[in-house]
Image (cartoon, rainbow, N blue to C red):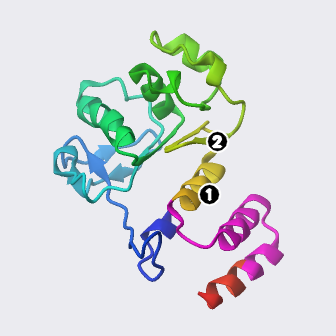
Amino acid sequence: MSAINMKSIPSKGNAEYCIKTVGSNKEPIHTLGGLTILPDISVNEIKKSKIVALLLPGSDTWSESKHKIILKNTKMYMDEGILVAAICGATLALANLGILNTYLHTSNSIEYLNYFSDTYTGEDLYQNELSFVDKNLITASSAGGLLWAKQIMQYLEIFPNKMIEAWFNYYSTGDPKYYMELLSLSEEI
């Protein structure tokens, strides 16, 4: 999502976006993939007036008590029209909050949500897609990361849609013609 962090391209009303990593506190986070992340801020330091999107990464720890505050705030952010984007295990957290009972959505599978969530009743709203957008919610399966990133960039209007398409086409196919198109379009900005 480095495209979101680029300062040189004004987006949506000339806003300049930057990514901040957030933790329940500022202690290092050790991911399942072996990365160590140092949060920029704690969840209590989020300024609602500054947030335009909440990106919830996949994890098998969303049911831990340390995540209660951010999950509680997730509903509030959605009610305020702020984008919430969840992938993989984070979609289960949204199912447990009841959010997926009222939005079109996807996840790792409908069986995954039904098996692991006691509160999920949104089967009729489930979309068999890698990633799906409904209003200010973007959900994705663990296999939908690239499409999820594209949809986030489109929602936030990070770049012109033509440039986002070239980016997506290059990274989904590896075809150099899309890379050249991306370079050409970036020179126009």
- Mostly what secondary structure, the magenta segment? helix
| Of 86 and 159, the residue lying toward us | 159
The local secondary structure at tag 2 comes to strand
Whichever of callouts 1 and 2 sits on the residue coming sooner in the sequence is 2
Distance Cα–Cα, label 1 vs label 2: 10 Å
Q: Which SS class for mark 1?
A: helix
Q: For the residue carrying disc 2, how many other residues have a C-alpha within 10 Å: few (<14), some (14-19), or many (20+)?
A: many
Magenta stretch encompasses residue 162 = yes
What residue sits right under mark 2 in the picture? 131
Q: Which residues are magenta?
A: 156-181
Residue at image position (63%, 24%) is: 125
The residue labelled by disc 1 is 150
Above or below for 178 versus 75: below
Going by the numbered disc 1, the residue's amino acid type is Lys
- The answer to which of 181 and 123 lies nearer the viewer is 123
Tell me if label 1 and label 2 are in contact, CB under 8 Å: yes
For residue 155, what is the image quadrant?
bottom right
